[in-house]
Amino acid sequence: MRLEPRIDETHPTCLRCERASIVCNGYDEPVLFVDERPRLESRALVRRSNIAAVVPGASSQHSISLDFSSKPYQDDLYVSFMVRELFKASRKNDDVKSWAAAGTNSSDPANVTTLSVRCLAATFFGRMRKDQRITKYGSMMYGKALTALNQDIRDPEKAFDHQVLTSTMVLEIYELIALTSNDGWLQHAGGIGRLIEIRGPWRHQRQSERKVLEYNRRKIIVQALATQKGTFLEQDIWKKVPWALEPESKCLLQHLLDIMSDLPGICVDWLSLGTPGKLSELENKTVRNRLSHKVADRLQQLYDWRWKWYEKHEHCAFEVIPKYRNLNLDENGDNLFSTVLYFQNLELANEISLYNTALSLLLQLRLTKISPTSQATGCVLPPRKTPLLLPGQIQSPRDPAIEICRSVEYHLLEHHATAGAHFLLFPLRIAHWNLSADPILSRWLSKTCQRMADWSGFEVGRTLVD
């Protein structure tokens, strides 16, 4: 699914872009969400055969009815299942409930939010119940939802309404569940980012609008990292204005995302250092020096954040002997970890995993191409013991990556497996990057991602570390 920026057709300049203080991309690129299922059809056939090989009951020997009509009570059943199971035992489940309410309260069955919610609900139900007929029905609803979304995007009165953003968020989750390819959700996340950027930071000061921004910040950052581009979120106005009226509402997670929003731009500079002929010797030295100071500064910001998190959540984590042996065994049947990490709740596990992801990434960038004259180390370790690594205990990019791996069992506990798997998608990708030199851990991560797709419904996990 792709989003191409659309302007408001006002001449001589685009007022929408002018009000949002962004560069107008011109009048010849209409907004368009594109159904990419035909392009991915051959991949989908391969995916279904792979699922049949590893998932009991997913055999393709049974014929699939081409009658995808669904009665209202069936849609209600799928939505009820989604509300109960998708992201359960996490705060994200509140978002699912609000999506479901928005999609079921409309009296218009062709409403874009209604179609998007039914699309996601049916697909999630079909994936979790291994029912290809219902999954196919969800795919058909996906096409209808895209048609309705394109119509709303072309309407200047609706293009940037909360309803359109809600629908795009719902369809992005659909793509994580329905497709193994990263292309769809990456392009869709880029489209969400573009819509939010055009809306501007001031429009997100109300609680309901700010919640939309907070929900999407991480995926916009991940999309920018994956596509090797900077993001508008690194601008100070996007770190301050949305919370200006209620500064106390900004939680530690959002402060962490402030730091992480600088990572895509840092990675762009880092990549330029390794491109032959792109920079002159003088430019290369200038970029290296600037990058060295920027990495050191963001590392110190991460360490400062970690100490604040420690002060607030000192006793939130504990070590246990692995309870699910098969999940923590290497290919030889040996335990990879003598103990694994459990947390008071999934949100805290998510926060520390994101911190470890950012830390592992920055340490790897510094190790490979940057040699700063000084290193940020935090401060003296406190006398209290904690099973989690503190800034002074980090020796290499491998350390935070291992800590992410030790939290996998907790993230995938049955009562919150879908939410935990969703949280883990990005951390496991970076952990695999930093542990790629270790063949045992690398293969274990690949196998874990396959299992995660089976247990949680997120098909994209199958190609996460390819």
Image (tube, rainbow, N blue to C red):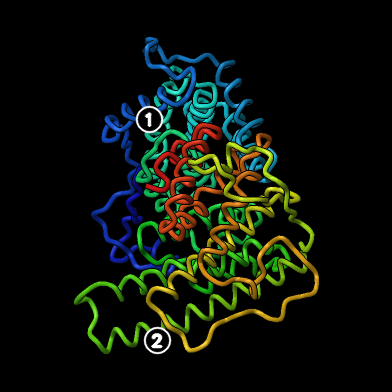
Q: Residue at x 65, y 50 (%)?
A: 338
Q: Residue at x 49, y 63 (%)?
A: 200
Q: Residue at label 1?
A: 143
**Residue at horizontal 65 percent and vertical 75 percent from the top:** 392
**Horizontal and vertical percent position of residue 196:** 48, 56
Q: Amino acid at mark 2?
A: Asn
Does the image show residue 167? no
Q: Viewer-nearest of labels 1 and 2?
A: 2
Image coordinates for residue 355, horizontal then vertical, percent: 59, 63
| Lateral position of residue 299 relative to residue 36, left or right | right
How far apart, in angstroms, are the residues tagged by discs 1 and 2?
49 Å
Identify which residue is drawn at 51% across, 25% down: 122
The foreground one among 72 and 357 is 357
Element assignment for label 1: helix
In-image side of 399 versus 466 (left or right): right
- 83 relative to 397, above or below: above
Q: Which residue is mark 2?
A: 289
User: The residue under label 1 is which amino acid type?
Assistant: Gly
**Residue 376, quarter of the rendered image:** bottom right
Label 1 environment density (alpha carbons within 10 Å; few <14, some 14–19, many ≥20) = some
Relative to 373, say whether 351 is above or below.
above
Work out whether mark 1 precedes mark 2 in sequence or the reverse, and give the earlier one: 1
- The front one of 229 and 14 is 229
Q: Nearer the viewer, residue 120 or 200?
A: 120
In the rendered image, the residue lying farthest to the left is 277
x then y, percent, for residue 141: 43, 26
Callout 2: helix, strand or loop? Answer: helix
Q: Quadrant of the N terminus?
A: top left
